[in-house]
Image: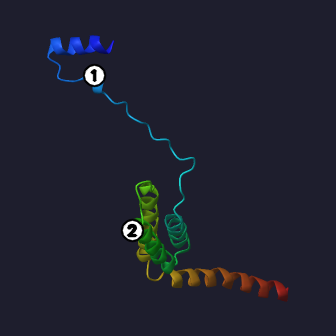
Amino acid sequence: MVADKAIVSSLSGDPRRPDSVVPYPQRVPSEEPKIDAYATAGMLLGSLGMLTRVRILSFVALAFIASAFVQRGPDTDTKQIFVSGMMSLMGIFVQHMAPLGAANANANATQAVAAPAAAAGAVGGQA
């Protein structure tokens, strides 16, 4: 059969040599993907920094993500590093975009809610 292919290829002007074709050796995938501890810690800290609005968590997450990026290998999941970086940057963005008087406004709102309740308790105590 190999000889037939060689004859056909020589007659048609095909320069390929079917007798020297080497089959491609398929790689066996590893059982489980490796978990990148730095990228995972960066994603968790970035999420916590965004949800709790604590800036230091987002900046520490950036340090973990930079470390994961520097130590990446050929089998590293770069999507995880990218998502971790976006979570950390969104945490910093959310924290810096908060209004400056947000803490004072929340305190004033709490006092405004507590004042009528205290006045109602005083009126109810006299009756």
Residue 120 position (above or below residue 13) = below
- Which residue is drawn at the image coordinates 53% and 71% (left, top)? 45
Kindly identify which numbered label has been placed on residue 18.
Answer: 1
Q: What element does badge 2 sit on? A: helix
Please indicate whether residue 97 sits to the left or right of residue 2 in the image.
right
Give x and y (percent) for residue 74: 40, 55
- Which residue is drawn at the image coordinates 31% and 27% (left, top)? 21
Q: What element does badge 1 sit on? A: helix
Q: Identify the amino acid type marked 1.
A: Pro
Q: Quadrant of the C terminus?
A: bottom right
- Which residue is drawn at the image coordinates 62% and 85% (left, top)? 111
Residue 45 position (above or below residue 11) = below
Give x and y (percent) for residue 94: 45, 71
Residue wearing tag 2: 70
Q: Quadrant of the N terminus?
A: top left
Disc 2 or disc 1, which is closer to the eye? 1
Task: Tell me which numbered mark, 2 or 1, is placed earlier along the sequence.
Answer: 1
The quadrant holding residue 2 is top left
Give the colour scheme of this rendering. rainbow
Give x and y (percent) for residue 32: 57, 50
- Which residue is drawn at the image coordinates 57% and 47% (left, top)? 31
